[in-house]
Amino acid sequence: MPDPLDMFSDDHDTPSGGDLDDATPTYGQTPAPLHAQGHAFPVARAQIRRDVFWQNVCREILLGLAAAAAESSGRTGIGPSDAQMSPDPVSELFDGRMAIITSQGQRIPIADVFPVFAFSVPGDVETRIRSSDVQCTVFRISTPTGESYTLPISQIVGIHSLSQSLIEQMEQAEASIDKDSIENRVPFGFAAYTSLARSEQQAKGQEYEGEEIPSPDAPSGTLQGE
């Protein structure tokens, strides 16, 4: 079966009617196609995957910080409603020493952070994929001075910390999101890679148009139902 990214070698318009070059990559799916004109296509393919992987890493880091903020402030969840009904976090992670760097070069210190949309929507395959594509891709960040920013992970080009210990605290908080995985922890960032692999597998599955989808863990020729 052809690689799902092979579709990027074809020139076509986006659903909104704009050029593909104007589309913005989003977490959970492959980014907008890159025209291979003047470039070796394998290089363009690699850059697409790197862009998605970086956005997945940003998502993993911000989710870790959101979990730490929830624990520090006594929240029962990491969503917007939980943040509105609780005090600000008091952990040293949120005194401004952790920050994001935007694509405009702006450093935004983090006093609180939570995803705008952090839920999976039940339904058919298309509905689940659609919600997965946008889940935890936009975050609201409050600064120590009271400013509030709502921005997509596609606009984040760096994570800044004034000490390594803060990064380690954030990684521990991220692991606490899934307590069952603490005993079998994988390196930080591995979830970002598996999200990339899963999104490509979903792209392959769409070619079956509702038929049974090959399981990535099953032997060749074995099908797994939805």
Image (tube, grey):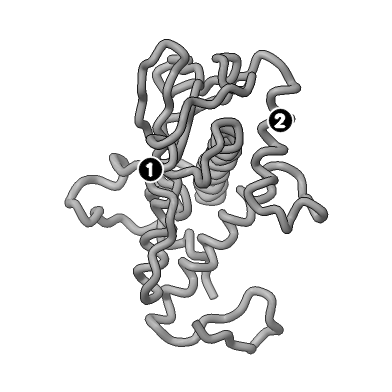
Which image quadrant is residue 131 in? bottom left
**Viewer-closest of 100 and 145:** 145
Q: Kindly identify which residue carries mark 1.
A: 81
Image quadrant occupied by the N terminus: bottom right
Residue at the (58%, 22%) spot, across then down = 90
In the rendered image, residue 164, in percent from the top left (x then y), is placed at 74, 21
Task: Name the residue type under label 2.
Answer: Gln
Marks 2 and 1, how far apart at CA: 24 Å
Quick one: 224 or 2, which is closer to the camera?
Answer: 224
Q: Which numbered tag is attached to residue 169?
A: 2
Which tag, 2 or 1, sits closer to the chain's start? 1
**Residue reaching furthest to the top:** 145
**Secondary structure under the numbered disc 1 in the rendered image:** helix
The residue at 52%/50% (across/down) is: 45
Judged from the image, the secondary structure of the residue bearing numbered disc 2 is helix
- Is residue 43 shown to the viewer in this render? no
Residue 133 at x, y = what percent?
Answer: 41, 55
What's the amino acid at mark 1? Ser
> Residue 39 shows which numbered tag?
none
